[in-house]
Image: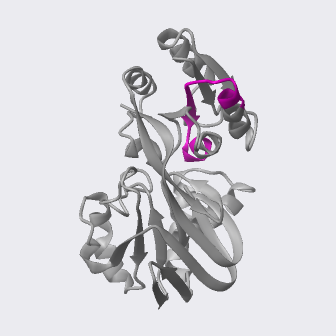
Amino acid sequence: MKILFIINPKSGKGRDPQDTVNCIKLNFPQAAWALTTGPRHATELAAKAVSQQYEAVVAVGGDGTINETAQALVNTPTALGVIPGGSGNGFARELRMPLHLQEAVFCLQKAKTVRCDVGQANGELFLNLAGVGIEAQIAYDFMQYGKTGKRGMWPYFKLGAKDAFTYQPQEMQLEYDGRRETIRPLSVTFANGTQYGSNFKIAPQASLTDGWLEKVVIKNVHKLKLLAAAPTFFTDDSTHLGVTDTTRVKHVLLRQPGEIIYHLDGEPKKTQDQLEIKILPAALNVLIP
């Protein structure tokens, strides 16, 4: 197989990029590899690989690197492969890829190609999840904090705890499948995959291959009820003690006057007044062990 490995040298929790390269050379001696140098570079490298008729491009990094790589592979014959190197690794977990480097590379040798769905939010790709509400606000605050402070899980949890007590849900209108509803939720997630990462399952019934998104509304319930339900998000219980409401959708228009903060696979974004979400069925070849 003609294959390119795109490696984000800044991901991997201290993993030496040279160790990654050595592992790839040992297991895929004929493969090409490249290191990213900044934002969007993975997309450029993947697009070049498509033009050179590579059969697969493997993203080595976190969900951001994987998303950037996939952007160039949608609706092409070139397959996306994944070696996890981030903190949450939501999409890699969705594919049941091992988190250990050598095990993940070994699994790629036996992987099969499956045609998977992808999502779009205002024309931008997401593989796993998109959403608005408190998790998007936390992602945005964490991005802002990372410009001046040290990133990591502890700052993320501190910001999350702060937002949990200060976030004010916003009223929004949703239109989908001929229905219209007005809600004021804690969050709304549009799930192609099941989880955010670290096995936190927002949509346990979601599938990458069914042609649908799961619209999961976390209701603005009392914080004690939300706290009681928290452990169920690490199980396959899709009811989450009644704090969520799930509907299968293909196309959604979300309207909220003014600024809308949302996220795509954990990466925070901003738009104004309207967010359009839709599913692109079977739009991406993916290597799955």
On screen, residue 153 above or below 228: above
Identify which residue, 283 or 155, lies in the foreground: 283
The quarter in which the C terminus is drawn is top left
On screen, residue 66 above or below 269: above
Q: Is residue 201 magenta?
A: no
Residue drawn at x 47%, y 89% is 181
Q: Read off the magenta span.
A: 48-66
Q: How is the image coloured?
A: one colour
Using residue 200 as the reference point, say whether residue 16 is left or right of it. Answer: right
**Looking at the rendering, which quadrant does residue 219 occupy?**
bottom left
Residue 120: give x, y in percent of width and height.
Answer: 58, 60
Q: Is residue 50 magenta?
A: yes
Using residue 256 as the reference point, say whether residue 243 is left or right of it. Answer: left
Identify which residue, 258 or 178, lies in the foreground: 178
Residue 116: give x, y in percent of width and height.
Answer: 44, 46
Residue 268: give x, y in percent of width and height.
Answer: 64, 62
Q: Is residue 169 visible?
A: no
**Looking at the rendering, which quadrant does residue 78 occupy?**
top right
Residue drawn at x 55%, y 11% is 25
Residue drawn at x 51%, y 82% is 175
Identify which residue, 50 or 155, lies in the foreground: 50
Residue 77: give x, y in percent of width and height.
Answer: 55, 33
